[in-house]
Amino acid sequence: MPQQILTYWFIAQIIGLAGLPLARLVVGALPAAGYPFAKPLGLLMVGYLAWLLAMLGLAPFGTGLVIACIVAVALLGGLSHAEGHPRAIWAWLRANWRTVVMYEIIFTAAFVYLAVQRSYEWGFIGPNPWGTERPMDFAFFNAIQRSATFPPHDPWMAGFSINYYYLGYLLMASVALLGGLPAGVSYNLSLALLFALAAQGIAGMVVTLVRVARPQAIRSGWAVALLSVVLVLGVGNQGGALQVISGTEKILALEGRDMLRLLVNGVGNRATVTLDPPFRGADFEGTTEIVPSDQIKDFNWWNSSRALWDSFPDENGRSRQYAITEFPFFSFWLGDMHPHVMALPFGLLAMALALHVVVRPEMPTYGQGRKSWVELLTVGAVLGGLYAINSWDLPVYLLLFLIAIFLRAVRDTHDTKQAIAWRTLGIQVLLVVFVAFALYVPFHLTFRSLVGGKAPLVDIPLLATASRTLGIVAWSKTPLQTFMIIFGLFLVPLLGWMTTNTLDRKNWYLPWVVMLVTLLIGIGIGFPLLVLAPLAAYSFMAAIERSREGFAGESFALAMFALCCAICFGTEIIYIRDTFENRMNTIFKFYYQVWLIWGTLAGYGLWRVLVAAPVQQQAPHSLMARLSLRFGQILTILLFLPLLAGALVYPILTLSKLYGEGTQIGLNGTNPRERDPDGAAAIAWLRQNVSSESVILEPTDGGYDTGGLGLGGVSSSTGLAAVMGWTGHQRQWRGGDPSVLDQIEPRRQDVDTIYTTLDSAQARDLLSKYKVRYIYVGPTERAAYSPDALAKFDQIGTVAFQQGAVTIYAVGQ
């Protein structure tokens, strides 16, 4: 295992060095000259070039192409500007070696930590890419490595390309090709790489914000940077603490009154609590009594990822349904390498690009000269790539970047009466938006959005189009206590910072009075997060004011805070219409981004409150302001520390179970198809001997392989295309394309027919219809289908592989 970890670490360093010249161009004005963002930038640009060349049919995707793209990215950065020359980079590295060492310590520690964590197995937590949605992630990860041309083939629907946000999988597949390690090892080390890139990016953002505000604040900057890494990646929400205090895993599903009863009961005599009326809704339908128990011993690590529950009115009253409230520690603990996880380091990269725009010496002049064109194309590749990695990220970070351009234009009005250069601003905005879209035209032309296929809610032109994708939240709003359970740890230092940020202003308290009144009104009408609207507006106005005053980093931090307030407010009003027809995914995807942004800002906010409050730098206006500052600092600490302790309950209890009761089995995870020597040999044979274009036949399942039989596992482990994989997931991926959606169930039935029919001619016709080249028959198939039905394959095909209970038949030409 150490050699495997070292292999991936070395590849990351090579890619980081290749990306460093470009990083010095696009974020070079930041204190560390772009170093903490060189690795994700290099990886994204290498992956983008490889994807584009394979997409256009100019080169086959593979190890050779990835290596060539690494060289190309390094040359592009090195030749486009003087700071990218190797001599300039070497001189900077020698002069700033302490900074480099600190960032590499963070990266390496995070990488090794998660790699070791992934090597332990406890229940279905562990290195095996099976359970929840890991089979899907493993399938895409392997299928892309087997696809010489793009778009990559869909391993679970032969004849179609992947209709999902697959660029993140491609980036991880590129590193896997370079590493040459077993598929299971590469999958787990990819998760470790993402974790380490995110940790380094978080530290880079926080140190940068601190150094921009106060260049000499080196030690305190690193301290709060490490704190922010923990806040984003190393803690949970308050659900774990509430579960332990109340003695029940059900507490998050209950409404506020019952939640309070359980908490009081949990710290008291822990009697049985009766629910009247009984609970109605998901997971706990019909629950009438809750008996507290020892939740430290029986900790439910799943329920914290379902902390927000909506109440839907129906004929019997109200039914409670959860929205997903996943957070990064949960994601890496679970091991799903999903797009929202893979987007983490690249979201941080986008933040850095936006911050660079705000703090750079001059307004961007994209499209004017070779250097600016390279910068524009790089920025466009990053921002546009977010859609292909995880489409939910694009609107947030593109808007943040455009806000940054606006704040930079505002900054030029500092100490002058000059108006904002709206024409220049507009040109830069249009160029960025155009290039971000244009660079990914091949993706957009071959991808059908997962949403937009619903019947319109409003049958009026324009509104009908919008209502196919967007719906109005017409049920309950998020309770204040739920919002604080999820984000309270971040909001305490952020609101403390926001308050101290205004203490040197006259009438500083008036906006907070307005927000308090709005909060009370919101609580009264059942819409407590209404307060986020004036908070977002006030924060954005403060960002503009700080920019005019020349405080570039502070203005950008305020703008990020405002944007997240607006996002959370927006999820109370509208949701994205998908398969689930509620806001489960809307909350999931947008709250995940808010967690990243607010968690990163929280360390900076705490630093501002305790170390660098504005009123400590200039004469305050009043004694009240000085007293308010001290009170705010004390109150922030008194609230923050208990919330931090509560957030640490989740990782402490989960990791203690993993390391105390789990077994270290290494990084080479397998699925149920590979758990015996026969199956392992069969999968190895398919990987080594079958061409990537071949179609295989294996049984399908509705989704999640609830029986643990490994259904869909042959295609998932090999990357070869099956006639049909998990139908439930295909319905989600094809939700925006009704014509393809209609083919899913007939395919499932045809697969079943091929295995069950006794009519060899019928089976041949169906095999020919889907161009099947290989039929897999193992213990799962022998248990599910009659021997007579399986015997027909001896006449239909020839035995290509046979060992023990596994036979693979070759059919067709």
Image (cartoon, rainbow, N blue to C red):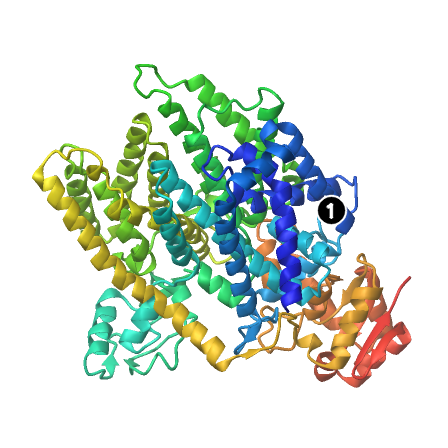
**For numbered disc 1, what is the local secondary structure?**
helix
Which residue type carries mark 1?
Ile
- Quick one: quadrant of the N terminus? bottom right
Residue 578 visible in the displayed image = no
487 or 480: nearer the viewer: 487
Question: On the image, numbered disc 1 is attached to which residue?
Answer: 67
Quadrant housing residue 139: bottom right
- Quick one: quadrant of the C terminus? bottom right
Answer above or below: position of 729 versus 166: below
Provide residue 675's location: percent of width, then percent of height: 68, 79
Q: In this view, does 335 lie to the left or right of 689?
A: left
Quadrant housing residue 265: bottom left
Q: Is residue 652 left or right of residue 606?
A: right
Residue pictured at 49% horizontal, 27% vertical? 429
Q: In this view, does 507 lie to the left or right of 605?
A: left
564 or 4: nearer the viewer: 4
20 or 144: nearer the viewer: 20
Provide residue 796's location: percent of width, then percent of height: 88, 72
Q: In this view, does 644 lie to the left or right of 787?
A: left
